[in-house]
């Protein structure tokens, strides 16, 4: 049987066929086989060309342009229409394909203005598909239209129509199988494109996170400085998403070198931009530059936060973000620590003599919240063995296996327990993170970056005569 659709013929035409002779019957049979062989070869080539396009085209639109051409030629007809659906099931207007393209302006206009086609799930609604089939039939001047769905993984990806403009058609099972194969290849192409777009989206996010991680990594010191009489240890534990955590150690007189720098006043800062990703990292980069310039002024912590707030006000207001920041400076000669707080998590001070934990806090608003914000300034003296833990909210907000937050009270208890073990600053930091990891669980991850800085006064430090500390 020929693969071309059979044209309807009158019964009278068969009476005119002469009685076949043996030679003519053999010749006719040979011609029929030759014709079938040529048509089968032609159809195989058409399907092969579509499969080749599927393997090699990276442009879905170019592939979909071929579908009506192959679908119509493979059954020897003149017309074909492909109506693809988007991932949400709505009609994909931009990818409508029809052949011949110059004879069906009214049909295309009706499909483009089909209100139901804009709705999510249109392609999965059988009633809407039946209505679209009727619309197509009304706009094509033939009563013989073959329609089949484009489906992948059980999800409708489109509808394929094939029709004749010249004569009626009797569809054979062979025709239907060929057209279904074309529809299946089309579904694979659409599904591949959706997967490719999703991969590209993930790659874009990964690139942003990589850039953000690089920015954040450049903000944080690669090593702790040497400050006379002090041990320092610091770490940022990044989450999946890049956050705006920041800590820094800055000499207030960078022109000093060697031992003179170690004995000079140092600024210790920790902060967090509200938000995640590259924008948070960029804002913290900007604030870091401003802050380092302010440190050189030698002003007390509250004045530095006041000036920083005014400098950053415009940039932060445009981004709709705010910054928490705890600023302190330490003088190794007097062991005095001055500090001011812009609504950051108050660091914890473990007093070695009393073996108790205090919060270091001072009044102050977020950086970027109000132009004329004022900040309080506090001052304490530190003794041998005293420990200060600076941290960001990624620590206290960490979720545990039971759904509880790590919380400040649990952090205080952890610091009190670990501080009694007579460890150095790095040992204290390692143990604090072990406690946090044990709480979160080995198979779980932090929702936000968690940063901690341990500042410890050497226990063998010789004490100069000092006035009593207010704390």
Image (tube, grey):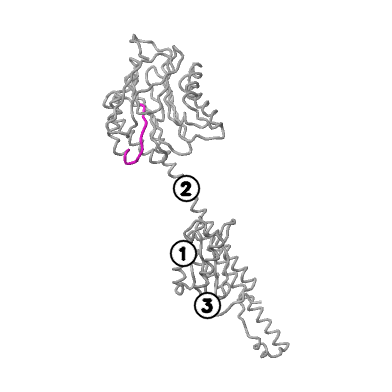
Q: Nearer the viewer, residue 320 or 62?
A: 320
Counting residues from the start of the chain, the first of labels 1 and 2 encountered is 1
Q: Is residue 276 above or below residue 164?
A: above
Label 3 belongs to which residue? 165
For the question of whether residue 226 can be seen, the reply is yes
- Report helix, strand or loop for mark 1: loop
Q: Nearer the viewer, residue 190 or 234?
A: 190
Q: Is residue 1 magenta?
A: no
Residue lying at the far right of the rendered structure:
22
Q: Is residue 65 above or below residue 168?
A: above
Q: Nearer the viewer, residue 141 or 367?
A: 141
In this picture, residue 153 sits left or right of residue 102 = right
Label 1 belongs to which residue? 114
Counting residues from the start of the chain, the first of labels 1 and 3 encountered is 1
Label 2 belongs to which residue? 203
Q: How far is mark 1 from mark 3, CA to CA?
A: 24 Å
Stretch of the chain drawn in magenta: 316-326
In this picture, residue 447 sits left or right of residue 336 = right
Given this view, does label 2 or label 3 mark the residue nearer the observer?
Answer: 3
- Report helix, strand or loop for mark 2: helix
Q: Is residue 320 magenta?
A: yes
């Amino acid at each position: 049987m020929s693969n071309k659709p059979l044209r309807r013929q009158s019964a009278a035409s068969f009476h005119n066929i002469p009685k076949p002779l043996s030679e003519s019957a053999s010749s006719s049979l040979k011609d029929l086989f030759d014709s079938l062989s040529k048509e089968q070869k032609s159809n195989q080539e058409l399907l092969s060309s579509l499969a080749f396009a599927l393997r090699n085209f990276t442009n879905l639109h170019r592939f979909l342009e071929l579908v009506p051409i192959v679908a119509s030629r493979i059954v020897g007809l003149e017309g074909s229409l492909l109506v693809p659906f988007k991932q949400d099931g709505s009609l994909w207007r931009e990818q409508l394909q029809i052949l011949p393209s110059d004879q069906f302006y009214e049909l295309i206009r009706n499909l483009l203005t089909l209100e139901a086609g804009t709705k999510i799930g249109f392609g999965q609604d059988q009633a809407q598909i039946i209505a679209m089939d009727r619309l197509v039939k009304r706009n094509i001047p033939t009563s013989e239209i073959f329609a089949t769905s484009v489906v992948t993984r059980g999800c409708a990806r489109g509808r394929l129509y094939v029709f004749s403009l010249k004569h009626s058609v009797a569809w054979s099972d062979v025709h239907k199988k060929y057209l279904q194969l074309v529809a299946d290849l089309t579904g694979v192409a659409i599904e591949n494109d959706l997967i490719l777009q999703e991969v590209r989206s993930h790659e874009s996010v990964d690139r942003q996170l990589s850039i953000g991680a690089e920015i954040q990594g450049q903000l944080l010191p690669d090593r702790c400085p040497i400050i006379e009489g002090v041990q320092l240890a610091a770490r940022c534990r990044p989450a999946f998403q890049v956050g705006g955590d920041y800590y820094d150690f800055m000499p207030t007189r960078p022109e000093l070198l060697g031992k003179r720098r170690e004995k000079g006043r140092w600024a210790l800062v920790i902060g967090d931009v509200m938000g995640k990703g590259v924008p948070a990292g960029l804002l913290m980069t900007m604030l870091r530059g401003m802050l380092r310039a302010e440190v050189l002024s030698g002003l007390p912590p509250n004045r530095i936060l006041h000036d920083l707030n005014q400098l950053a006000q415009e940039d932060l207001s445009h981004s709709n973000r705010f910054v928490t920041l705890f600023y302190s400076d330490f003088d190794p000669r007097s062991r005095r620590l001055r500090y001011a707080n812009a609504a950051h998590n108050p660091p914890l001070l473990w007093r070695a003599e009393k073996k108790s934990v205090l919060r270091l806090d001072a009044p102050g608003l977020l950086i970027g919240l109000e132009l004329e914000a004022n900040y309080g300034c506090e001052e304490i003296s530190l003794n041998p063995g005293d420990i200060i833990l600076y941290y960001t909210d990624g620590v206290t907000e960490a979720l545990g296996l039971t759904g509880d937050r790590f919380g400040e009270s649990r952090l205080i208890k952890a610091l009190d327990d670990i501080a009694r073990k007579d460890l150095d600053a790095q040992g204290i930091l390692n143990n604090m993170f072990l406690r946090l990891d044990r709480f979160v669980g080995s198979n779980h991850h932090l929702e936000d970056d968690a940063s901690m800085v341990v500042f410890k006064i050497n226990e063998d430090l010789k004490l100069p005569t000092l006035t009593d500390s207010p704390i």
